[in-house]
Image (cartoon, grey):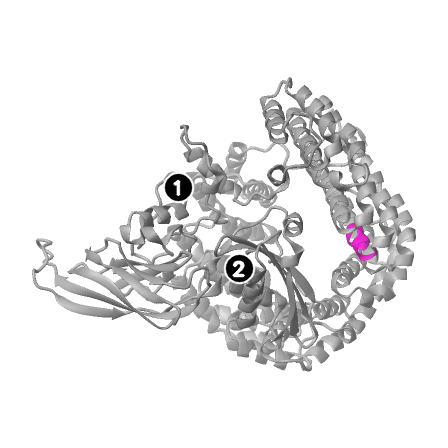
């Protein structure tokens, strides 16, 4: 006798769950499907076979066209069975197979018969299946039945029709929109699910009409919605209306806020929570508005239901990021959740307490967290580490206890992401809290002695090379660094060699000892390590002198790389070995290649130079080659910047023109890329007449016409202007395309000898201050900022008035300056009341510029801005402030 399946559960060594579908194969199941053809149907066995088929389909098993067709026709024979369970399985199978149009007709009559059946279960399922497999032609035939079903007395049938309407809205929106009256009636239904589905469908029908959505919310918030599910939907729609109305109105009472507040007293917990969450997520929410929502969330913290505790603590965690003081009243309740059996709830409680705690409670919290960390998974530990980092930056005097905590968990077992989060936190604390530098570097040195992750070892060695030489006793770190040369893999050894060289460059007293260590590295088995050692010995000068350190050496070892790595790689690939050494100054400094022509209108070819060759030549190089090939521009000097193309014509017009602005120190060249889109015309002597009456500082010096512009063959014409040298002159230019039109014989392709002069008005273009700024990022903004002379720094504050949001303001300032955002600071967190953006660039004249902009927004949406600028020239720092003031 076979061993019973129960034994499988008794075997503690095998904890895999037993599956009734284990080991089934498509071929075997298709053989079993022949049971559908039996004259005497076995309803139970047929249901089991359909279950297996559905399992295979949902596991990603693909059926061939023939197999799917055979199964489909076999399943349709099961309509003759009166078994209710089997009929439901048949509906599911037809939906999953999604038959083709010629097959649908086979089951359409059966489904339409079921749709008018007296059995409500048949009616509901038939509606769902028909709407899933039908096309627009059949849909118009059954539309009358669907409308009746929406207002049917049976809630199952009504819900089926409404849900089908939601799905059909994606493909046949015009038909579904005609059901508005019936859906409106269903919204008043007493059945909870019908009201929920009706409200969802009605909102989707009206979602593109803001006024209609506002009217819907206005009418329903007066108390006609009884279903808790529908009430939750209504709260979400109300929040949407509040957000949209706040964008168009100034400070004052929010519309519908009283409704949200009244929902906090609803008898259904889900409605109360939805209302509380909606209030906390309102943009610019005040402490007074938050108070009632925080109160109900605090009550949920002590609920016996884990899902309620989790929902409440997660919402409070988000609120604590922007309004920590509003959440402090919940601290006692949250502390009790640290020991919650659900680790997700406990983690959120810990991180929320870290955000809301005060300086006196830090030590107590750290003790609680120490016991807690061993019980949670790595992903939760990372969240806790990030929260501790934020708390330490908030209370810098407590750095010792937090740094010790981070060093202790760094020694424990853990994955790469977890260890990286700890290392990143220690690095940030060292950078932002000067007193923590020595203890933090010591903890990092201890960690790399037993670090299994190459990436983290190299990251720490790089950081140690930057910060170690600046400490009171740099020599104590040399042992840890040289141990890496002896004990680690080639990647870490190479990084350790670079770190040793940095100590030798920055600390004169260590230079002789560093030379000894570097010479030992010349015998390493890895060529990268040997090459680096050779390079640094030559760079530092291995004469063992301990004189003053050369500034060029420091700049080489510590200075930021002024060119993007992608561009450097491309230039190195293009470099051909010769007597002329590779010059890094030849590498383009643009952050990323810009297309020479914007996306063309459908059916048109790109205008302008077209795409660059398939090789890695950069766009900047292509522009430089083009301009240098024109003798008239040879006296203008080096090209500083080429802006991205700007369209001067509408899509689908007779002539397509865009312009590229090329900026030189004392000149500006407009490159007009033209395309003739009329096959029967040839354009000759094409020029652009530029009116510079609104650009007083510019004077036209030359025009280079385009001799011939055949159909669909791009060409360029140029206009050059002189401007004051090194000055970011701005102005507006009007453009008029002038040319001679010659008719072309379609049969022969030959043009008439005589032509007619014609002209075509183009859009205006502007030269703005951002055109004189080259976007160039820096790898380490803090180091780059400190390397610039503080005497060249200029700081001022500006009131920017009422703005919609901080994100919009940050984007506008970046656009005005035309600089490269650094370290992801262009992204503003949701509901943030303050933000700092770091920008980098090179101003005309090759002057490095760094900008630190701090923004703040108050409850009335008044935005204040503090702008700090450092550059290599104090006049340029002043100029940046002038640009912002005028912008």
Magenta span: 388-395
Image quadrant for the N terminus? top right
Residue at point 91% right, 48% down? 367
Badge 2 marks a residue whose secondary structure is helix
- Where is mark 2, residue-wise? 128
Question: Would residue 618 be visible to someone looking at this image?
Answer: yes
Instruction: Tell me whether circle 2 and circle 1 mark residues in contact (CB < 8 Å).
Output: no
**274 and 438: which one is in front?**
438
Q: Taking 493 as reference, is 123 above or below it?
A: below
Magenta segment: does it hold 29? no
Which sits earlier in the primary sequence, circle 2 or circle 1? 2
Numbered disc total: 2
Assess disc 2: are there few (<14), some (14-19) or many (≥20) residues with their C-alpha within 10 Å of its C-alpha: many
Distance of mark 2 from mark 1, alpha carbons?
57 Å
Task: Say left or right for 283 vs 98.
Answer: right
| Residue 228 placement: quadrant | bottom right
Rendered location of residue 602, percent (x, y) = 32, 58
Rendered location of residue 211, percent (x, y) = 54, 79
- Where is mark 1, residue-wise? 617
Question: Would residue 348 be visible to someone looking at this image?
Answer: no
Task: Say left or right for 563 vs 8.
Answer: left
Task: Say left or right for 819 vs 743.
Answer: right
Rendered location of residue 555, percent (x, y) = 61, 41
Q: Taking 866 as reference, is 44 above or below it?
A: above
Rendered location of residue 396, percent (x, y) = 83, 54
């Amino acid at each position: 006798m076979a061993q019973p399946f129960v034994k499988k559960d008794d075997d503690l060594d095998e904890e895999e769950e037993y599956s009734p579908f284990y080991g089934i194969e498509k071929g075997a199941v298709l053989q079993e499907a022949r049971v559908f053809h039996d004259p005497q149907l076995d309803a139970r066995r047929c249901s089991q076979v359909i279950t297996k088929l559905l399992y295979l389909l949902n596991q990603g098993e693909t059926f061939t066209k023939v197999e799917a067709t055979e199964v489909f026709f076999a399943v349709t024979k099961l309509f003759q069975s009166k078994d209710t369970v089997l009929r439901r399985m048949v509906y599911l199978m037809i939906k999953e197979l999604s038959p083709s149009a010629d097959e649908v007709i086979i089951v359409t009559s059966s489904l339409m018969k079921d749709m008018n059946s007296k059995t409500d279960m048949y009616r509901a399922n038939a509606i769902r299946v028909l709407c899933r497999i039908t096309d627009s032609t059949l849909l118009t035939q059954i539309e009358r039945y669907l409308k009746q079903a929406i207002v049917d007395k049976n809630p199952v049938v009504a819900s089926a029709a409404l849900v089908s309407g939601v799905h059909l809205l994606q493909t046949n929106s015009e038909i579904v929109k005609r059901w508005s009256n019936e859906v409106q009636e269903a919204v008043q239904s007493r059945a909870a699910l019908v009201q929920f589905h009706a409200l969802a469908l009605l909102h989707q029908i009206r979602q593109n009409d803001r006024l209609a959505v506002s009217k819907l919310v206005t009418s329903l918030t007066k108390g006609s919605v009884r279903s808790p599910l529908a009430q939750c939907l209504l709260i979400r729609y109300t929040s949407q209306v509040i957000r949209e109305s706040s964008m168009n109105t100034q400070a004052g009472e929010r519309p519908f806020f009283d409704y949200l507040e009244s929902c906090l007293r609803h008898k259904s917990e889900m409605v109360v929570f939805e209302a509380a969450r909606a209030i906390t997520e309102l943009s610019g929410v005040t402490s007074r508005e938050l108070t009632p929502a925080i109160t109900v969330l605090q009550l949920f913290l002590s609920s016996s239901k884990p899902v309620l505790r989790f929902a409440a603590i997660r919402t409070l965690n988000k609120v604590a990021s922007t309004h920590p003081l509003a959440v402090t009243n919940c601290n006692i309740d949250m502390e009790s959740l640290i020991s919650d059996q659900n680790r997700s709830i406990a983690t959120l409680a810990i991180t929320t307490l870290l955000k809301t705690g005060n300086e006196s409670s830090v030590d107590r919290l750290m003790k609680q967290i120490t016991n807690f960390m061993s019980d949670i998974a790595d992903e939760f530990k990372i969240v806790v580490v990030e929260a501790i980092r934020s708390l330490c930056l908030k209370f810098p005097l407590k750095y010792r206890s937090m740094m010790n905590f981070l060093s202790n968990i760094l020694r424990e077992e853990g994955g790469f992401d977890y260890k990286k989060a700890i290392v990143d936190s220690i690095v940030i604390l060292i950078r932002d809290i000067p007193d923590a530098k020595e203890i933090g570097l010591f903890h990092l040195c201890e960690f790399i002695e037993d670090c299994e992750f190459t990436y983290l070892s190299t990251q720490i060695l790089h950081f140690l090379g930057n910060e170690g030489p600046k400490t009171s006793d740099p020599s104590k770190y040399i042992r840890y660094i040289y141990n890496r040369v002896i004990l680690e893999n080639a990647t870490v050894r190479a990084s350790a060699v670079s770190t040793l060289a940095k100590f030798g460059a920055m600390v004169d007293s260590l230079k002789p000892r560093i030379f000894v260590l570097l010479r030992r590295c010349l015998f390493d088995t890895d060529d990268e390590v040997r090459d680096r050692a050779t390079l640094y010995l030559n760079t530092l000068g291995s004469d063992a002198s301990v004189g003053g350190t050369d500034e060029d050496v420091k700049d080489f070892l510590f200075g930021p790389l002024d060119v993007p790595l992608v561009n450097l790689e491309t230039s190195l690939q293009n470099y051909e070995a010769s007597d002329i050494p590779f010059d890094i100054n030849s590498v383009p400094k643009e952050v990323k290649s810009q297309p020479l022509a914007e996306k063309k209108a459908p059916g048109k070819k790109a205008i302008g130079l077209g795409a660059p060759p398939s090789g890695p030549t950069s766009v900047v190089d292509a522009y430089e080659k083009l301009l240098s090939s024109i003798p008239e521009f040879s006296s203008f000097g080096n090209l500083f910047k080429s802006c991205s193309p700007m369209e001067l014509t509408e899509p689908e017009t007779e002539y397509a023109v865009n312009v590229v602005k090329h900026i030189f120190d004392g000149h500006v060249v407009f490159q007009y890329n033209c395309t003739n889109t009329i096959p029967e015309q040839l354009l000759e002597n094409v020029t652009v007449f530029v009116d510079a009456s609104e650009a007083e500082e510019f004077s036209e010096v030359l025009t280079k016409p385009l001799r011939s512009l055949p159909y669909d063959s791009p060409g360029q014409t140029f206009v050059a202007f002189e401007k004051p040298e090194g000055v970011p002159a701005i102005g507006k230019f009007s453009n008029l395309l002038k040319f001679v039109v010659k008719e072309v014989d379609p049969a022969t392709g030959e043009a008439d000898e005589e032509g007619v002069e014609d002209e075509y008005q183009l859009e205006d273009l502007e030269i703005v201050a951002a055109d004189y700024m080259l976007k160039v990022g820096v790898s380490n903004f803090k180091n780059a900022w400190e390397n610039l002379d503080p005497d060249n720094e200029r700081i001022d504050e500006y009131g920017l008035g009422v703005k919609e949001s901080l994100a919009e303001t940050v984007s506008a300032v970046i656009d005005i300056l035309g600089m490269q955002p650094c370290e992801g600071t262009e992204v503003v967190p949701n509901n943030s009341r303050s933000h700092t953006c770091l920008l980098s660039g090179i101003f005309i004249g090759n002057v490095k510029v760094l900008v630190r902009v701090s923004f703040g927004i108050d409850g009335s949406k008044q935005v204040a801005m503090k702008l700090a600028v450092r550059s290599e020239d104090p006049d340029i720092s002043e100029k940046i402030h002038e640009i912002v003031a005028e912008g």
